[in-house]
Image (cartoon, rainbow, N blue to C red):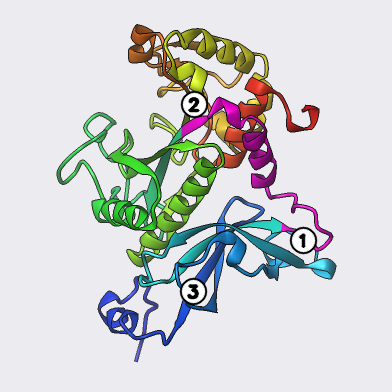
């Protein structure tokens, strides 16, 4: 009898097991970022703890870094140091998600651990009260790697009706978007919204405002939750900055930034000073703003050119946009539109802090 693999979880059968008593134990899913900026995870059993676990209560764990591109085979142990804890929207109850940094056996941060340096910068410049808000664009793919809902042969109608669209033929897989939103809210992620994007099968969710290192933590867990939800619906998530060549919008990770000084009356002078500093380090920022970003930052499809820095009020074709409302009030925030959808939020937020206020090693 012929059989086929099932790529979609059987939610009805799973449900009866989710309600089973765990007899005083919890499941702790340790999550980390690998060498290709993909999330990885594995689960361990811990005794339930009154009041729940904080990162300092949790044991350090390890994994085989040679299988994730993070260590050589002859010295493969990489250690997981818990840094943030979230309620688990999949296992429910007292079960938790444990975001972890990767460290080497000699006590140094793994070379793919971007969080460590970013956290140092956030702590050093904490007096500025840096707020970030990131807009994560992504594309939903079928298991054949074609954008979900696109014709088997050819292309859908040109862009226009899809952005913030409603109705059949305009949006696809809203179920994944809603499930992800609810999972984020349950987990305590500071998700602030979602919408369908310009290209069909492309969506966006926003995380923030978050203070300092919290931004990267919350965005990475939101990415993990999206991957898990899509897995259950038999879809893939692509963070490629230009998933489809041609006259289609790319995908970015627009980064909104402000400090206490920028948010106060007359803060525009601080916004303009920060943008001036960003303009002088354009190439350094582009270097950490995502792989394959050159295919997206062409000066078309609501982007600036990768080769030059520009800014303007309400200009979505510039490197940095000052919202019209901010210009009118003379205080607020600015939006760096250069980061690609696949960029590491720790690298983005870290280099913005470094550019605006100086590196950690000079303080």
Which of labels 1 and 2 is toward the front? 2
Cα distance between the residues tagged 1 and 2: 34 Å
Q: Quadrant of residue 22?
A: bottom left
Q: Residue at x 63, y 51 (%)?
A: 36
Q: Which residue is mark 2?
A: 257
Q: Is residue 207 left or right of residue 198?
A: right
Residue furthest out toward the bottom: 1
- Determine contact: label 1, label 3, CB under 8 Å: no
Which one is in front, 222 or 126? 126
Q: Quadrant of residue 324?
A: top left
Q: Residue at x 75, y 49 (%)?
A: 111
Dot 3 alpha-carbon crowd within 10 angstroms: few under 14, some 14 to 19, many 20 or more:
few
* Mark nearer the N terminus (1 vs 3): 3
Residue 108 is one of the magenta-drawn residues = yes
Q: Which residue is mark 3?
A: 49
* Mark nearer the N terminus (2 vs 3): 3
* Residue 40 in view here: yes
Residue 157 is one of the magenta-drawn residues = no
Q: Position of residue 192 (x, y in %)?
A: 33, 40
The stretch in magenta equals: 103-132
| Disc 2 secondary structure class | strand
Q: Position of residue 130 (x, y in %)?
A: 53, 29
Q: Which residue is mark 1?
A: 71
Give above or below for 43 relative to 257.
below
* Mark nearer the N terminus (1 vs 2): 1
Q: Residue at x 42, y 87 (%)?
A: 23
């Amino acid at each position: 009898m012929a059989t086929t693999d099932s790529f979609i979880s059987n939610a009805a059968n799973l449900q009866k097991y989710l309600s089973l008593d765990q007899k005083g134990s919890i499941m702790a899913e340790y999550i980390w970022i690998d060498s290709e900026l993909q999330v990885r995870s594995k689960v361990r059993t811990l005794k339930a703890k009154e009041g729940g676990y904080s990162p300092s209560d949790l044991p350090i764990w390890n994994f085989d870094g040679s299988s994730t591109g993070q260590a050589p085979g002859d010295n493969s142990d990489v250690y997981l140091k818990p840094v943030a804890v979230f309620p688990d929207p999949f296992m429910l109850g007292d079960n938790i998600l444990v975001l972890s940094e990767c460290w080497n056996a000699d006590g140094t941060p793994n070379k793919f651990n971007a969080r460590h340096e970013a956290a140092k910068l956030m702590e050093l410049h904490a007096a500025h009260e840096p707020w970030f808000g990131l807009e994560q664009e992504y594309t939903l793919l079928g298991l054949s790697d074609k954008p979900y809902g696109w014709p088997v042969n050819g292309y859908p109608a040109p862009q226009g009706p899809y952005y913030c669209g409603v109705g059949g033929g305009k949006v696809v897989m809203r179920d994944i978007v809603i499930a992800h939103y609810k999972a984020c809210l349950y987990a305590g992620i500071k998700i602030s919204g979602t919408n369908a994007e310009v290209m069909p099968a492309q969506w966006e969710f926003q995380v923030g405002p978050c203070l300092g290192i919290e931004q990267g933590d919350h965005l990475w867990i939101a990415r993990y939750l999206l991957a898990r939800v899509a897995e259950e619906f038999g879809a893939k998530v692509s963070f490629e900055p230009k998933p489809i060549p041609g006259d289609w919008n790319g995908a970015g990770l627009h980064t909104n930034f402000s400090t206490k000084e920028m948010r106060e009356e007359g803060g525009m002078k601080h916004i303009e000073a920060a943008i001036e500093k960003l303009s002088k380090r354009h190439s350094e920022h582009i270097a950490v703003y995502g792989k394959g970003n050159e295919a997206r930052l062409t000066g078309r499809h609501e982007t600036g050119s990768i080769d030059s820095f520009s800014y303007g009020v309400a200009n979505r074709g510039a490197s940095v946009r000052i919202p019209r409302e901010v210009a009118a009030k003379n205080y607020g925030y600015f939006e760096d539109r250069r980061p690609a959808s696949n960029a590491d939020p720790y690298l983005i937020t870290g280099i913005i802090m470094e550019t605006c206020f100086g590196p950690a090693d000079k303080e």
